[in-house]
Structures are given as C-alpha cells and as structure tokens.
Image (cartoon, rainbow, N blue to C red):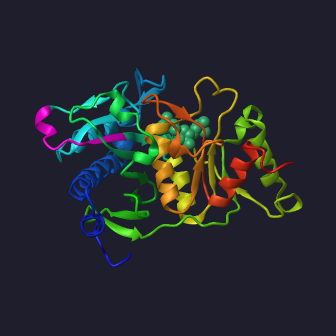
C-alpha cells in the first residue's frame, strides 16, 4: 500500500482551488456512506437484505431491499456536511430537496446510483456506487439546475464492493484509488494516478444483444472475434460482469473497452445506462485516466442533458479502441 496515506490526508493535500473545502468535506461523507453500504452488502442475507421488494423504481425496475437501504444510507450520510444543496438518485423519480438546517453552505448537487449492478447482489458478484458532483446555480435547486453537461462535473467517483472495497475518484486532476482497510475502517491510497493502458485486447459487451446492435458495433465485435486471422491481427479476450463499476475498474487497471450501445430494443429509451449518474461520472474518470468515452457519435461528456433519468449509448475505455469505434460510426474507416 503506497505510503499508508489515508483518504483524508490525500484530499487535504491534493484538492486545492475554489472547491477544496467543500469537496474535501463532501468526499469524507461519501467515503463514510460507502463504508456503511459495504457493511450492508457484507451482511447480505444474514441481515435479511437480499430480497426483492414489491416496489419499482422510476425506470420500472423491481427494487431490491438493498437498492432502498443503500439509497437511504447515501442520502442520510451526505446531508451532514451542509455543502449539498440537492441530490438526485437512480432510485427516486424527482430531485431530492435538502431541508434548511442541513444545507447551510449548500452550493453543490450530488447525483448518484447507490447500488449499480444490483441484479448481481443475489448471486454475490461485485456491485458499486457511482456519484457525480456539480455546482448549483441556486441554493434551493430546481430540476433545471441539475441538467448540466458532464463537462461541468467538478468531481466524480465510484465505490466498488468487490474482493476488497475501493473508492476511486477524480476532481479533474487525474484519478486515484483507495482501498478500505476493514480492520481500521480507513480508506488508504492504493492506486495513485491511475492510467488506462493504451493498448488492449479485451472487450466487454453483452453478446446476447448482438442481433439488435447497429452495424458499426457488429463490425467492431466481428473484427475482435476474428482475432489473429482477421484485420486486427491479434486475438481478443472478452469479459462481461454485468456490473458497470466492476468493468470500468478492470479497464482502469488493465485496459479494455466497455460497451452498452444503443440497440433496436432500446431505441425508444435512448440506451440502457443513465447519463447523469452512470455515464457522465464514469466518462469523467475514464478521460481523466487518459481513456475516452463516446456514444458512438458524440463525446459523452458533451451530451446535452434534458432529463434527470436520460439514457445514452455508452462506449468507453482505451483511447485508440474508442476512436476506432467512433470512426466506424462516422464511417471514417471504410470496410
Ligand atoms: P442498474 O443500474 O439497474 O444496476 O443497471 C445498470 C447495469 C450496469 O452496471 C451493467 O453494465 C448493465 O446494467 C448490465 O446490463 P445487462 O443485464 O443487460 O447485461
Ligand atoms: Mg445503475
């Protein structure tokens, strides 16, 4: 573990500029919330946390007990610093207003997915929490204040509840990863200045959707599958965890591309993954680590946001591969 630097020591030293006080304080609360979530997941079935509820969230998805538990933990814990003016969650239809006494210094918006990949919870596979922080134009924010492009993010991160619990974040100056020491309850810097490896031979996509994809995505995957005998002249490996946080983390550590493209089943929805609290924060992290993120036709961080739960096609990871995929969409690389 690199020099045993705690997350608080790291933030105090490295987060500078106009948002430093607020970010340090908010990130401390976020780290606390993620620790509590890690515990709730660890206790799992023993605490009766694993079932499905009768309720559905705004996306029409059946909520798991842990979706609701982790949502409550995240909201409750992140009201404490007083810097958060409003929140938005994958699990809630509308923006979350923060009561007056809890937002004395409220100038920031916190958008989050408390438990991404929650379909994996019952089968004991890694899940995560994703968050994004924006500046609010209003102390009492309304929906319009949240609808900012991803380029406006001042901080983004995720917690991965995997073989160890990690918190990975960016404030726009590179990406750093911290690992939870369960014994002391402290996050320590374990992955300083993460960079996405430039070369990759690994892709992540739900192959069962192949027949629904658009031609540029089929073409890219076909060429990967042809391996050394095909135009790419090298063999590719494939992974699909069905947990975006786990896939993106793997890409940060050893390279690769993660794809959830538009397909004919998703056409009306605009994509599978949500822009504001899934695609934007993960794209910010990937770009800060030297990678790239596109819808196929546009940089994700520049997508105009018109709804809280808006969906987008997502392709992110090693820069050269993402540029190739974008070039297939714009037909800049001919067959
Ligand atoms: P969720 O927020 O409802 O958990 O959905 C998002 C997840 C991503 O983590 C993952 O990449 C994707 O859904 C998996 O989808 P699929 O089950 O279609 O493979
Ligand atoms: Mg999600």
- Please give the name of the residue rendered at 74% of the width and 35% of the height, measured from the top-left corner: 214
Chain part drawn in magenta: 100-111
Q: Quadrant of residue 211?
A: top right
Locate residue 12, reporting x and y percent: 24, 66
Locate residue 93, reporting x and y percent: 38, 24
Q: Is residue 110 magenta?
A: yes
- Please give the name of the residue rendered at 73% of the width and 35% of the height, measured from the top-left corner: 213
Q: Is residue 231 magenta?
A: no
Locate residue 134, reporting x and y percent: 34, 44
Locate residue 280, reporting x and y percent: 47, 44
Q: With respect to residue 59, does 17 lie above or below?
A: below
Looking at the rendered image, the quarter that the N terminus falls into is bottom left
Q: Is residue 88 left or right of residue 120?
A: left
Q: Which residue is situated farthest in the bottom direction here?
A: 3
Q: Is residue 82 left or right of residue 75?
A: left
Q: Quadrant of residue 251?
A: bottom right
- Please give the name of the residue rendered at 41% of the width and 38% of the height, measured from the top-left corner: 148
Residue 255 is at least partly visible in this image: yes
In the image, 305 versus 48, the foreground residue is 305
Q: With respect to residue 203, does 100 lie above or below?
A: above
Q: With respect to residue 57, does 289 lie above or below?
A: below
């Amino acid at each position: 573990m690199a020099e045993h630097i705690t997350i608080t020591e790291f933030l105090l030293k490295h987060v500078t500029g106009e948002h430093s006080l607020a970010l340090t304080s908010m990130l401390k609360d976020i780290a606390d919330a993620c620790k509590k979530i890690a515990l709730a997941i660890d206790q799992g079935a023993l605490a009766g946390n694993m079932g499905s509820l009768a309720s559905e969230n705004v996306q029409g998805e059946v909520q798991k007990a842990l979706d609701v538990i982790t949502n409550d933990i995240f909201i409750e814990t992140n009201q404490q610093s007083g810097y958060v003016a409003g929140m938005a969650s994958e699990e809630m239809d509308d923006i979350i207003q923060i009561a007056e006494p809890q937002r004395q210094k409220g100038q920031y918006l916190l958008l989050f997915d408390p438990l991404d990949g929650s379909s994996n919870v019952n089968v004991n596979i890694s899940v995560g929490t994703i968050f994004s922080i924006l500046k609010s134009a209003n102390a009492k924010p309304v929906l319009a204040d949240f609808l900012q492009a991803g380029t406006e993010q001042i901080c983004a991160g995720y917690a991965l509840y995997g073989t160890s619990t990690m918190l990975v974040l960016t404030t726009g100056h590179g990406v750093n990863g911290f690992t939870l020491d369960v014994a002391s309850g402290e996050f320590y810097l374990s992955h300083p200045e993460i960079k996405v490896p430039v070369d990759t031979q690994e892709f992540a996509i739900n192959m069962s959707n192949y027949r629904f994809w658009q031609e540029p995505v089929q073409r890219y995957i076909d060429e990967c599958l042809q391996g050394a005998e095909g135009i790419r002249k090298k063999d590719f490996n494939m992974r699909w965890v069905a947990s975006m946080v786990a896939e993106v983390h793997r890409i940060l550590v050893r390279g690769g591309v993660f794809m959830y493209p538009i397909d004919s089943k998703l056409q009306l929805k605009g994509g599978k993954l949500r822009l504001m609290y899934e695609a934007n924060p993960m794209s910010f992290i990937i770009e800060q680590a030297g990678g790239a993120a596109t819808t196929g036709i546009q940089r994700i961080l520049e997508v105009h946001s018109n709804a809280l739960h808006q969906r987008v096609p997502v392709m992110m990871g090693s820069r050269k591969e993402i540029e190739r995929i974008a070039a297939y969409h714009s037909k800049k690389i001919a067959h």
